[in-house]
Image (spheres, rainbow, N blue to C red):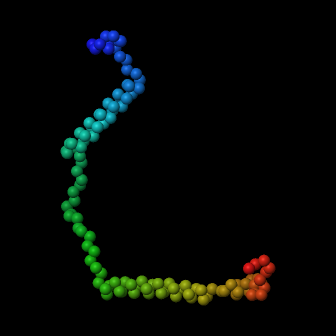
Amino acid sequence: MSCREWLFGPREECRTCHELRSQLDFAQNQNRYLLGKLLEPNAVPQQAQTSESPVPISTAPTPWNIRKSILEKEDRAQAVVLKKRQEELKKSKSTDELEKALDIPGVEEGDIPSGVG
């Protein structure tokens, strides 16, 4: 028995101290558990080993004749697409033709309404 306990009686623990002590105990137990898992080599699952050895990715340069043929194919495909677009534009009617077909009076250069422009 210490002098303090003899003079003032046994010390009672407050609620906050009790909560802090229980949180400290929990953290210490968690740390012990995690350290035990780290230090036990048998408990850690090993990665599945494959029988194939990893093959490095080779970036061999493409020969010019193969590269040239690939580029030419792409250019031909783009030319076909452009030609189709031009044909579609030629077949489509212009705005003037559409206005005439729908009987909409067109705006001539001198016929600009007032307040516009």
Q: Give the x, y percent position of residue 41.
A: 20, 45
Left or right, residue 52 beside residue 96: left
Residue 114's quadrant in the figure? Answer: bottom right
Q: Give the x, y percent position of residue 65.
A: 31, 87
Residue at position x 34%, y 14% in the image: 10
Residue at position x 77%, y 83% in the image: 112
Q: Return the residue found at the far top.
A: 7
Q: Is residue 36 visible?
A: yes
Residue 75's quadrant in the figure? Answer: bottom left
Residue at position x 70%, y 86% in the image: 96
Residue 35's quadrant in the figure? Answer: top left
* Image quadrant in which the N terminus is located: top left
| Above or below 73: residue 11 | above
Q: Return the residue found at the far right.
A: 114
* Image quadrant in which the C terminus is located: bottom right
Q: Give the x, y percent position of residue 25.
A: 32, 30
Left or right, residue 27 beside residue 48: right
Q: Is residue 103 visible?
A: no
| Above or below 30: residue 73 | below
Q: Nearer the viewer, residue 52 or 56?
A: 56
Q: Give the x, y percent position of residue 79.
A: 48, 87
Residue at position x 52%, y 88% in the image: 83
